[in-house]
Amino acid sequence: MFGLGLPEMMVVLVIGLLFFGPSKLPGLGKSLGEAIRGFKKGIAAEPEEVKAEIEK
């Protein structure tokens, strides 16, 4: 996963905790997950479905 090991992931988590605070991290994780899910769904969609979404 991007060449990151456990120590690097821990550093990223601590920096995120310090920057955003403990109350906002769950919401950020949820919104990031939804964004990734939507991106994957958009990539996997058929071209006709994409055209229909754009025309709405």
Image (cartoon, rainbow, N blue to C red):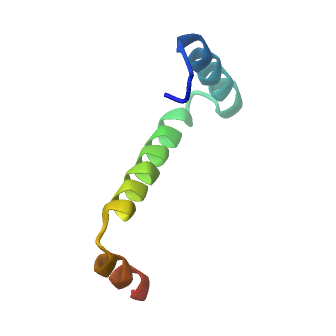
Image height of 7 relative to 13, above or below: above
Q: Residue at x 54, y 15 (%)?
A: 5
Q: Say which of 55 and 13 sits in front.
A: 55
Give the percent coordinates (x, y) of residue 2.
55, 30
Image height of 56 relative to 23, above or below: below
Q: Quadrant of residue 23?
A: top right
Q: Quadrant of residue 42?
A: bottom left
Q: Residue at x 59, y 11 (%)?
A: 7
Q: Say which of 38 and 2 sits in front.
A: 2
Q: Residue at x 41, y 88 (%)?
A: 55
As drawn, which residue projects farthest toward the bottom? 55
Q: Quadrant of residue 51?
A: bottom left
Give the percent coordinates (x, y) of residue 17.
63, 25
Give the percent coordinates (x, y) of residue 16.
64, 28
Image height of 25 relative to 48, above or below: above
Give the percent coordinates (x, y) of residue 10.
58, 15
- Left or right: where does residue 20 sit relative to residue 1? right
Total marks placed: 0
Image height of 23 relative to 38, above or below: above
Q: Say which of 41 and 19 sits in front.
A: 41
Quarter of the figure with the C terminus: bottom left
